[in-house]
Amino acid sequence: SQQGEEDPQALSIQEGENATMNCSYKTSINNLQWYRQNSGRGLVHLILIRSNEREKHSGRLRVTLDTSKKSSSLLITASRAADTASYFCATYRDNYGQNFVFGPGTRLSVLP
Amino acid sequence: GAVVSQHPSWVICKSGTSVKIECRSLDFQATTMFWYRQFPKQSLMLMATSNEGSKATYEQGVEKDKFLINHASLTLSTLTVTSAHPEDSSFYICSAQLRDYSPNTGELFFGEGSRLTVL
């Protein structure tokens, strides 16, 4: 089964609203990262949260991590049309065959 | 931040030909580079891990003779799709890991991707 599964798979909101995306994983991790991908482009790193951290902020982004539930959430506040993109969580496990594992992603559409 | 350049950004080729995609870290040394394949509206599928000066490690189900990876220097890795066929058409993305990567602080830096269309 897949490490790092986001939900919802697709999310459509109005500009100004908050967007929340969730990510679940199955094994222990060293850290969890969120990336953004605009259509047809590469991925851009947004934020990294270590396994001993519970919450982290960066601008309009807020990430939480619950290692007991093996889940993370990404909150984008006051969304803008420019936030329209796909968002992926990625888990990192040190000294493991495939260190980085990406989830299926959430496609966010922010309507003006 | 660190920049990874991937070239070409798109390529169209005839069936049976080979295509080379380059991935360069412009302002840092990358001990390890990763090659991914991405289908429309899907996540990234890791194809192989490329380590400078050694053979690439391929994921299960990825043909190493089909997808040749060379990591000749700390700033360049190449992926060659040999004898390409229409089913190889996809979006290929590389990423690089800093030489002094620490699991507690690191991140991956991605190229812009290369869209391959095989006719």
Image (cartoon, coloured by chain):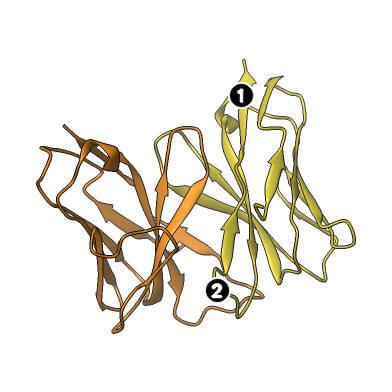
Q: Quadrant of the C terminus of chain A?
A: top right
Tell which of A47 and B68 is nearer to you.
Answer: B68
- For the residue pair B9 and A76, the one nearer the viewer reads as B9
Q: Residue B103 occupies which quadrant of the picture?
A: bottom right
Please state which amino acid type lies under the numbered disc 2: Gly
| Mark 2 vs mark 1: in front | 2
* Residue extending farthest top: A112
* Residue under label 1: A109
| Residue located at (31% from left, 66% from top) | B26
Vertical order, B18 against A15 (above or below): below
Give percent across and percent down for residue B74.
31, 78
Q: Colour of chain A?
A: yellow
Asked if residue A48 is positioned above or below residue A85 in the image, the reply reads: below
For the question of whether residue B112 can be seen, the reply is no
Disc 2 is placed on an element classified as loop
Location of residue B30 (image quadrant): bottom left
User: Relative to residue A12, is residue B34 drawn left or right?
Assistant: left
Q: Earlier in the sequence, mark 2 or mark 1?
A: 2
> In the figure, residue A15 lies in which quadrant?
top right
Q: Say if labels 2 and 1 share a chain.
A: yes
Q: Residue furthest right?
A: A68
- What residue appears at the point 69 percent right and 42 percent down from the top-left corner? A6
Asked if residue A108 can be seen in this view, the reply is yes
Drawing shade for chain B: orange
Badge 2: few (under 14), some or many (20 or more) residues near its Cα, within 10 Å? few
In the image: residue B44, left or right of residue A103: left
Please name the residue shown 27% across and 68% down the image.
B77
Q: Which residue is mark 2?
A: A97
Give x and y (percent) for residue A7.
73, 37
- Chain bearing tag 1 is A
Residue A39 against residue A58 in the figure, above or below: above
